[in-house]
Image (spheres, coloured by chain):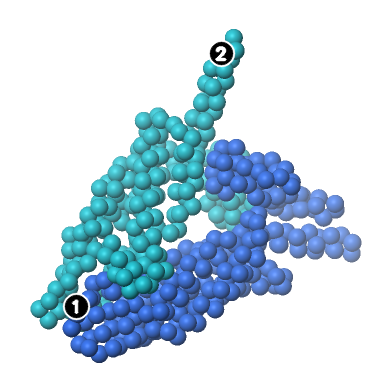
Chain colours: A blue, B cyan
Amino acid sequence: MASRETTNNNHYRSGKEAGLVLCIECHTIHQYIPHMAMRCSRCGAQLHQRKPNSLNRTWALLITSIILFIPANMLTIMNVIYFGQDDPSTIIGGVILLIQLGSYSVAFVVFAASILVPLFKMVGILMILLSLKYNINLSDSQRITMFRYIDFIGRWSMLDIFVISILAALVNISGIAVITAGSAATAFGAVVVLTIMAANSFDTRLLWDYKQSTDNFLNSNNEQIK
Amino acid sequence: MLCHECDLLIQNQVIDEGSKLQCPRCGHVIYKQKHNTIGKSLAFTITALIFFYPAVTESIMSISMGGKSQHQSIIEGAQVLLQEEYYLVAILTFMCSLLVPLLRLLLLFYITFSLSVNLFHKSFFWSFRLYHYIEEWGMLDVYMLGIIVSVVKLSSMAEIQAGFGLWAYAGLLLTYILAANSLNPHEVWDLLLEHKQLGEKQNQTKTNQEAA
């Protein structure tokens, strides 16, 4: 109990500790009743103090997306048949083509959207999960900024999928030029969807729960030393 | 009040019109005080819905190559991929560039229109929840960037001309973003709660009268 009191006096107090639960849909606050399936009295959404199985779900989705990221980059994403000649290209091949065309800014945008963003996103979520699992002390403001960035930027990696669908539909002049999608497109689409779902299933409040529990631990240790 | 991102307990505070409340621990913007946003949002929603049909069915751009030309609309983009049997890619394109934006606009129209003429129905609650739930999957802005990238990619191969669909699409994108951003969701939830409580009171008086 000593540790609890120190948190009350010196530290931030969370809604969970106060026995409250927030509806994440309409932001109404309710009294939490343990071991009961609760629904929000205003909007009818299910209430949980923390998203159920948040870490397990995020891990599963993250690992699947990392596995799929390999074929997404190795296989051909787009096949350009120009005057009867096949010219299959991978994601990085498309970027190189843009550099050769001289449009560096667009090349950078595509490179960022289809390689940097998914990579950054997967590494970022992995770092947050690992820091939670092995109690590595990353700065909280760094972690939350990183997560917000990941969450915001994730949808932009859909760019390549849209470019393929536009090109495949537009360039379809038989005998001259035909563009078809490749199997990497499916893998890449799956990576994008899975990383977005992984970010959604992660409950940011867990970051602070962990921080509080270590703070309490340190405080109680300090008190014992005194 | 509780912060949505770090679950910090904050004392209830009075917030002035036009200002916002930020979490002192994680910096998340918890609440923005903005009133009378429903009418504005409704206006943008109607404009966006008007833009929607031409944006989707008219040709976005056309290319000409060796004397032959070809044009394409958004809906054809998904169709071609379906024919090539890339189902996941086709469904993703169709969902993110068409279905989700349309659904969101319709839900927004349903809620803002009924609230501005003082109608109320139970289905508003799940409609507004669904509206927020699918928010991330509406990717009109990303698709716009996709159009730009494809133009650059094709510029060496063929001549490209913008179609009427592109202008309608730009208008749709602008009004879609404005409709979503001008709405203060807290205002909608508060109004919905008021209506719900009012309805419950009326029901009670009715049953009381019948009992009497």
Q: Residues within 10 Å of mark 1 (few under 14, many from 20)?
A: some
Look at the numbered discs 2 and 1 and tell me whether their residues touch, using CB distance below 8 Å.
Answer: no
- Residue B90's x, y, as percent? 36, 67
- Residue A44's x, y, as percent? 57, 41
x 52%, y 72%: residue? A121
**Mark 1 — on which chain does it sit?**
A
In the image, residue A191 above or below residue B182? below
- Answer with the quarter of the image where residue B151 lies: bottom left
Residue A131: which disc?
none
Residue indicated by mark 2: B210
Q: In the figure, is residue A100 to the left or right of A34?
A: left
Q: In the figure, is residue B122 to the left or right of A53?
A: left
In the image, residue A89 above or below residue B74? below
SS class, disc 2: helix
Q: In the figure, is residue B184 to the left or right of A225?
A: left
Q: In the figure, is residue A6 to the left or right of B84?
A: right
Residue indicated by mark 1: A173
